[in-house]
Image: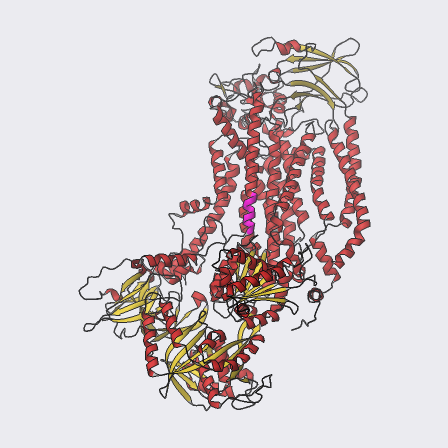
Amino acid sequence: MLRRRLNRLLGRDERIADRRTIYVGHRSGSTNDAIIPPKFCDNRIVSSKYTVWNFLPKNLFEQFRRIANFYFLIIFLVQVIVDTPTSPVTSGLPLFFVITVTAIKQGYEDWLRHKADNEVNKYPVTVIEDGRRIRKESEKIKVGDVVQVEEEETFPCDLILLQTSRDDDTCFVTTASLDGESNHKTHYTVPDTGRDLESLNATIECEQPQPDLYKFVGRMHIYTSNQDPAMRSLGPENLLLKGATLKNTQRISGVAVYTGMETKMALNYQGKSQKRSAVEKSINAFLLVYLCILVSKALVCTTLKYAWQGTPGQDEPWYNEKTQTVKETNFYLKMFTDFLSFMVLFNFIIPVSMYVTVEMQKFLGSFFITWDKDFFDPEIKEGALVNTSDLNEELGQVEYVFTDKTGTLTQNNMEFIECCIDGFQYKYRDASSELDGFCVTDGPVSKLQQKAGREREELFLRALCLCHTVQVKEPIECHDQGDGLMDQVDGLEADGQETSSLQEQRGFIASSPDEVALVKGAMRYGFTFLGLESKTMKILNRNNAVEMYELLHVLNFDPVRRRMSVIVRSKSGDILLFCKGADSSMFPRVRQEEVERIRMHVERNATEGYRTLCVAYKYLSAEEYNQADKGLREARLALQDRDEKLMAVYNQVETGMSLIGATAVEDRLQEEAAETMMALQGAGINVWVLTGDKMETAKSTCYACRLFQRNTELLELTVRTLEDGGRRREKRLHDLLNEYYKKAVLDAPPVKGGVTRSWSSTNQDYGFIIDGATLSMVLNSSESNSSRYKNLFLQICQNCTAVLCCRMAPLQKAQIVKMVKNSKGSPITLSIGDGANDVSMILEAHVGIGIKGKEGRQAVRNSDYAITKLKHLKKLLLVHGHLYYVRIAHLVQYFFYKNLCFILPQFLYQFFCGYSQQPLFDAAYLTMYNICFTSMPILAYSLFEQHISIEVLLDNATLYREIAKNAMLRWGPFLQWTLLSLYHGLLFFFGVRFLFSNPALQDNGQVFGNWSFGTIIFTVLIFTVTLTLALDTRHWTWINHFVIWGSLAFYVFFSFFWGGIIWPFLKHQRLYFVFANMLSSVSTWLVIILLILLSLMPEILLTVFCKPRGSNARQMKHRLPSSGTSTIFMLSQTASTHSFSWSD
Amino acid sequence: MMASSYNAKDEDGHISVSGPGGGALRSKKPENTAFKQQRLPAWQPILTAGTVLPAFFIIGLIFIPIGIGLYVTSNNIKEFEIDYTGVDMSSPCFNCSQNFSWNSTRPCTCTIPFYLEQSYENNVFMYYGLSNFYQNHRRYVKSRDDSQLNGDVNSLQYPSKECEPYAYHDNKPIAPCGAIANSMFNDTLELFYHPNGTKVPVPLTATGIAWWADKHVKFRNPGENQNLTAVFQGTSKPVNWRRPVYELDYDPLNNGFINEDFIVWMRTAALPTFRKLYRIINKKDNMVPTLQRGNYTLEVVYNFPVRSFEGRKRMILSTISWMGGKNPFLGIAYITVGSVCFFLGVVLLLIHHKYGNRNNSADISN
């Protein structure tokens, strides 16, 4: 977003680079100019990062840019260069392993990309050159080439449509592979480009490539020999995007404007910014601590070494002389070398394999989300989608959920409920009851059983039929038009709802479901939209007569104006403007005397949770129309600021209309929306609803979702409340803020630890409502103390159970998310939405979730996770998030733990070996410890652990609070783990050291040496570390059993094997028979058992004394036999003041 | 179809794994397998006071007897130790330690008398103990050539670089090379029993003191069954040795690299104070104790200087039990841990008894 804006800013500064000129068919525009063909990139798509040649260096470079890899590389190099205690293999091998695995993975991914690239680049296309059709490979297309595309083919580059085989100068495309919208979109040829492409002499001037799929501004100059060049404006409707597919059109020709990496598709795929999880930040912090420990250990050892060597006879006793080269080395260099050697010796404290394991865990773990059958939606036959596995654990840390309303909380499955015409309410009951489909409700409206004039009714219905951008689906229109027509009429008259709804579903395609609902609504009342054919809209009216309207202009919908209009010319020649839009945007633009009648209906509908639209019309005189027409054409031709100019014209045209009526469309709540919201709130998550909808509608949705309860006190901060006092708005705003702050923050009883909000019913719940205008006042307040108010606002919001932000522009949604994200404590935010307007907030939040809804795939494409229904969010967070977090947190802590107690004995040993960097463990053990002996159990744990079972997690949302705020990766638990590893390390070392005060440990009097010493410690270490994990494992699947006992068995087997053979490639046979000999000593067995038991003791005591969560939950489950009961149990606590039935 | 449909993510060398969002997976209904639904049958053990309590008692009940057994065993092991370094003026070896020189041709001997207050039944093991001798120093530990010791002829001629500065002497390869071999303990210790003023040498067995695998596999003389003198032709003896390696013993099965004294020495000790098995005094018959109580003398051929690094030399006589040499640590540790477990068991029992019920009710009210 920012980059784009920056680009635009920069672009404005240098206008020259802002546009490109394209010579259609490479023919120079004006006759006298010689073309200097500008250089554009070719049409090769390169999504791959490497070639065969640069793979190795580039991949290695990229990998070593990562700090941990670089660290290990340095250690490795030190080992190679300096005489260090352990051979370079010990750190080289794991590093090599990690690097290789990563390289293979990235190489494979790149190979896939190469394959995909090739498929696209070698795809044969037809290019028209000098009238001849030439087959070419797609990658050879140059900007300016005229390309021909057949039906069902994808466009090889971004094309300006010049010619189509259809008569009406249109073509249909689907952009399913671009944004997932499977509806057919109509694109138009540039007018007057002529039927004759060979002789077309034109240039196109257009903006430089930019990633926005829906924006394109350009101008085409058509040169004919005898006239001045004609100029045509080009917009997105003329641009065919690479990746889209041609439908329902036999053949089109177009000129390439953007090729290769400059196509909009390529620009859009150039990566999202990577989100990093909080766990990763914790890892880095811990890493820093361990790095400090490492350096200080090395420093201590180096210092002590030189102090110790100072006493005579110790540095170089007669039995242990130094080599000549060592003797000659500079003293300080020696000191430095020693320091490095210690670093190398202790470097295992930073676990090289942790990154691999963490990545593997994330990658493999994310499969469980896609595999979860609960996420599968039979309707669209899709399950959840994981776009990034980096954030799995973040799902368990969410503190704020920002949800869109339409399509997310609600189904976005619009149903026309009622309308009001001139203040009279019409409610559709049954099509068959009256022929005309109208019947009047006996609602609370005063004008009972009254109808508006028939003329008004028809006008209103015509408006509904005309004012939209709905398309009639092709098959009906093309193949059996007559039949389809008959069918629809039949469908109307048949009394079975199902047949008609079937018809309806098949009938219309639109980008917004509201429009379909309205058109269908009109159809029920007798006005059927038959389709748009070459700028003519056909309507079948109540008398089964076809009315034709010439579509002159469509004033498109946009979220700022919040309305759309069409200008049509009726058969009789009248020019009409129909406009529909949100009440707030309509009321100021219509005659005021009509407003009051309608307003009541609109507001009542809104409180019932319906989406309301007002419909207005006006007659345009020829003069007015001409003016508007001119304005629109001019604005559309503008290259710069086209949008702003268009907006100005739109606003100018859409004035002085007369209001006919309003519609109410119901958007039903998503399944289990309320339950999900309750669960989220129970989990301690603040739910904010960010919607573009109007306050009343949004509020009623909030009530329906039980985000607001009946006893929730609502704090309103909207334009309306601001205008109440009559004082200056800002002053009033600040007063209100202060007042609310006092109410919600200061007077609120302090939140007791452990006792959760929803459990204590005594607390007053607050709900906060703010609208877009007020929000921008808060955020962009000009006054000096604006940050104070921003802060106040934030604190109020944080103390409220639910916050509703209505009338939000997409950017404002992102703004809010950003504000919360950057507030104190930097809480983890999650955005969930389904539409293009949610993309900004999805990208902004820590975790973005897209719903595979009806508004296209943009949200899904930009999200980190995509689910099919809102209700899945509950399981995603409460179960998957919780488990992933616990798993990864334990993984990280365990890794640091096991490496500290691995290295601590080695450190302690330095005090007993004259600080000579003598390793305690054999090189094989040093190398394999992290790779083989201890890596698998923790990986299995981190994939399969369920310390609390899935059902319990689902039933008890409060469990989510226990891991909130990164609870398992804070310094407290870290310290706990560190202390445990210190205890273990000390115990291992000194236990064995005291045993070795008499090294005659065998019953034949023979003695053990230093390698036996190390091996005993290592055996204890392996067993303790693995058993510690076993103690923490609450969920033993066969895999856990296999891996835990398997790695212990493997260790024993390996030790026998390693010590059983004189290895020809080894310089030292240090471990020869050491392990077997060790096991032949009873004392060793005894000490091993003792030490393992002793080191597991604290863990056991801790779990016994501090009751484990699992048992708590289990007991709870035990007491509450069925899960349903427990839900009700919880909910009845929550809403103890009033009862409600849960079944709806 | 689309090149970039494969997630082309910017990876800054970071192993970022793009999730399994491939198109193939999309439209397929997830399989309803226990594995994929994370519903594998699982054993869910929970440590509660109820399960841990008996464990503690059992551990206590097992450990305390073991500990007592170990302690008693350790206490029953007889051990006698004399320091013969010769630091004190009064010490018989003072002169030897004082006048030590590597070049002296005549070995210095000293005799230390001692009195055994107990008679030693069973086999008696004779150890030499060194203090402040860093056999575990890194430079020292690695200063050996295992392939040479394994009988590799090539390594005999060209010892490993690790052996520096004890690899070559006078341009001849040293066999065995390295600091460990070079500094082999070369005091000769002999034991004499003085029953009634007479001097009876105590028979010392020099075999069976090294690990079986070391003696038979890891250490081998170069050149199968050849004359050792011939095999070691062209090599130099370690600088500090008085005799070449092929003259360590008269017994051909205990000579050269497979000399057990040498093998024992080559197994580097774990700590700077250590003991190594020197000789075994085998029990002759059941009637007579191996070492009777009475007066003994230890005759030392004093070749091994330790005073330069403040070291100490000891001779230790010890019997051996099933748990090895005398070491009270294990027994005490077992008794302690056993008692602690038992005590914890009691505490837990009390807590469980007293608070167990209350805990349950607290859960409900929660």
**Viewer-proximal residue among A462 and A184:** A462
Q: Is residue A920 magenta?
A: no
Rendered view: B305 above or below A128: above
Q: Is residue A908 visible?
A: yes
Q: Is residue A407 left or right of residue A1139?
A: left
Residue farthest to the front, as pictured: A727
Task: Please tell me whether residue B331 is drawn above or below residue B191 in the rendered image.
Answer: below
**Residue A285 covered by magenta stretch:** yes
Quadrant of the snapshot with the C terminus of chain A: bottom right
What predominant SS class does the magenta segment belong to? helix
Q: Find residue A702 and report its horizontal and vertical position in percent.
A: 59, 69
Left or right? Give the position of A1055 relative to A84.
right
Q: Position of residue A444 (x, y in %)?
A: 60, 83
Question: Is A487 above or below relative to B366?
Answer: below
Does any portion of residue B19 appear in the rendered image? no
Q: Position of residue A579 (x, y in %)?
A: 43, 78
User: Which image quadrant for residue B68?
Assistant: top right
The x, y position of residue A241, in whole percent, is 37, 66
**Region in magenta:** A278-286
The image's colouring method is: secondary structure
Q: Report the quarter where the N terminus of chain A lies.
A: bottom left
Q: Residue at x 66, y 68 (%)?
A: A711
Judge by depth and name the residue closer to the eye, A732 or A71: A732
Examine the rendered structure and indicate whether residue A642 appears above or below residue A338: below
State the image quarter where residue A623 is shown.
bottom left
